[in-house]
Image (cartoon, rainbow, N blue to C red):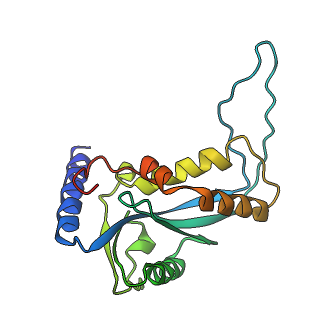
C-alpha cells in the first residue's frame, strides 16, 4: 500500500508537470463505463408505515460509453460503443480527434490493456498520459459516470437496450457545462483550474 500511495503522489506530480509544459493543450480525462438493463437499487424516501416496493430486473444486455471530460472548460465528448477493446478505442480516438478540429488535447486515462496496446493509433493532436495503477479517484471521468448512473439508472427499469440508450443520450446531451465543472472538479490540480 505504501508503494501504491507513492505512485499516486508521483502520478499527480507528473500530471501537473506535463500539463504545465503543454499549456497549448486542453486536458481531458477519459474513461469508459458499462451500462445495461440490470437494475440498480438506490435509497429513497417512503411514507412511514408503508412498505416500499421497488421493481428489479435482472439482465445481462449491455453496452459501453467511452467519454472524455475537461474539468477546466466543462467540455465533454462521448460515444456509445458495444465493447471495450483496442479497435473501439482507436475509433474513439479518431472521432475525438476529429471533434477537436484544430485544438490539441492531453487525454489522461487509466492503464487498461487496450489503452496501452501496441495497436493503439494515437492521432497527432492528442497526447496520452497514464494515471498510476489503482487510482480511479484521480480520474474525474469516474465521477461523471457516477453522476449519470445516479440520475438515469437508480430505481429505474429499462426493458430494452434501445430504451436505455435513448434515455442516456438525452441525459448526456442535457448536462450543462456548469454541471460538468461541478461534478468533475480536480482538486489536486488547483493551478490548472
Residue at figure coordinates x 82%, y 55% from the top left:
159
- 65 w.r.t. 136: above or below: below
The quadrant of the rendering that contains the C terminus is: bottom left
- 81 w.r.t. 145: above or below: below
**Camera-nearest residue between 128 and 185:** 185
120 left or right of 87? left
- 134 w.r.t. 18: above or below: above
The quadrant of the rendering that contains the N terminus is: top left
Residue 61 appears in the figure:
no
Residue 177 appears in the figure:
yes
145 left or right of 186? right
Residue at figure coordinates x 64%, y 58% from the top left:
35
Residue at figure coordinates x 43%, y 82% from the top left:
97
**Camera-nearest residue between 131 and 74:** 74
**Camera-nearest residue between 63 and 77:** 77
Residue furthest to the top:
49
Residue 14 screen position, x and y as percent: 19, 61
Residue 88 screen position, x and y as percent: 54, 78
Residue 21 screen position, x and y as percent: 17, 70
**Camera-nearest residue between 71 and 148:** 71
Q: How many marks?
A: 0
Residue 85 screen position, x and y as percent: 52, 75
Amino acid at each position: 500500500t505504501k508503494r501504491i500511495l507513492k505512485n499516486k503522489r508521483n502520478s499527480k506530480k507528473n500530471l501537473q508537470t506535463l500539463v504545465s509544459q503543454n499549456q497549448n493543450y486542453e486536458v481531458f480525462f477519459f474513461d469508459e463505463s458499462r451500462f445495461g438493463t440490470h437494475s440498480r437499487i438506490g435509497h429513497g424516501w417512503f411514507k412511514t408505515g408503508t412498505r416500499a416496493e421497488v421493481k428489479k430486473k435482472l439482465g445481462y444486455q449491455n453496452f459501453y460509453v467511452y467519454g472524455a471530460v475537461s474539468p477546466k472548460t466543462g467540455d465533454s465528448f462521448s460515444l456509445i460503443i458495444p465493447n471495450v477493446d483496442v479497435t473501439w478505442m482507436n475509433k474513439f480516438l479518431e472521432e475525438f480527434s476529429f471533434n477537436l478540429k484544430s485544438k490539441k488535447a492531453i487525454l489522461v486515462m487509466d492503464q487498461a490493456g487496450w489503452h496501452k496496446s501496441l495497436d493503439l493509433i494515437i492521432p497527432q493532436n492528442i497526447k496520452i498520459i497514464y494515471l498510476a495503477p489503482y487510482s480511479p479517484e484521480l480520474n474525474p471521468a469516474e465521477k461523471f459516470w457516477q453522476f449519470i448512473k445516479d440520475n438515469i439508472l437508480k430505481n429505474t427499469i429499462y426493458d430494452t437496450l434501445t430504451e436505455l440508450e435513448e434515455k442516456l443520450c438525452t441525459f448526456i446531451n442535457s448536462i450543462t457545462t456548469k454541471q460538468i465543472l461541478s461534478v468533475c472538479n480536480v482538486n489536486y490540480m488547483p493551478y490548472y483550474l
